[in-house]
Image: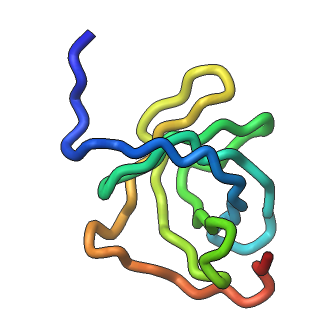
Amino acid sequence: MQDRRKTPRAIVNQVAKIQSHDGAVVQNCLVADMSDGGVRLVAESQIPDEFILFLEGDGGVGRECRVVWRLDTEIGAEFVHADGGDLAQPGIGW
């Protein structure tokens, strides 16, 4: 199998929260690994095609993401803004 990643991924295995863009849906997931360009998530429930990802310990700062593949409970998502494009969201805290 060919690795098509643009940048290497680091194993993270950290709990995170996913919020829909309208702020209505917040759910937990596991960030399995991450690179400069995206993440691989594990989630038991349906993830929207576009969402904001909040990592534990980032003080309520999130990254805008877009799903690029799905396989059972795993999701591959790219960061929408390559420059980091962090979003602060009130009400999402650890």
Question: Where's residue 45, x and y in %?
Answer: 79, 38
Q: Residue at x 63, y 68 (%)?
A: 54
**Quick one: 75 or 9, which is closer to the camera?**
9
**Residue drawn where x is 56% and y is 40% of the image:** 32
Determine the residue positioned at 58% across, 66% down: 52
Q: Where residue 26 appears, x then y in whole percent?
A: 79, 63
The quadrant of the picture occupied by the N terminus is top left
* Residue 90 against residue 38 in the figure, above or below: below
Left or right for 48, reference 10 = right
- Identified at 80% across, 56% down, the residue is 27
- Image quarter of the C terminus: bottom right
**Residue 59 sits above or below residue 55 on the image:** below
| Residue 3 rendering spot, x and y as whole percentages | 24, 24
Instruction: Answer with left or right where residue 17 lies relative to residue 36.
Output: right
Residue placed most toward the observer, 40 or 77? 40
Q: Is residue 6 left or right of residue 38?
A: left
Q: Is residue 3 depicted above or below 66 in this figure?
A: above
Identify whether 70 is placed above or below 66.
above
- Total tally of numbered discs in the picture: 0
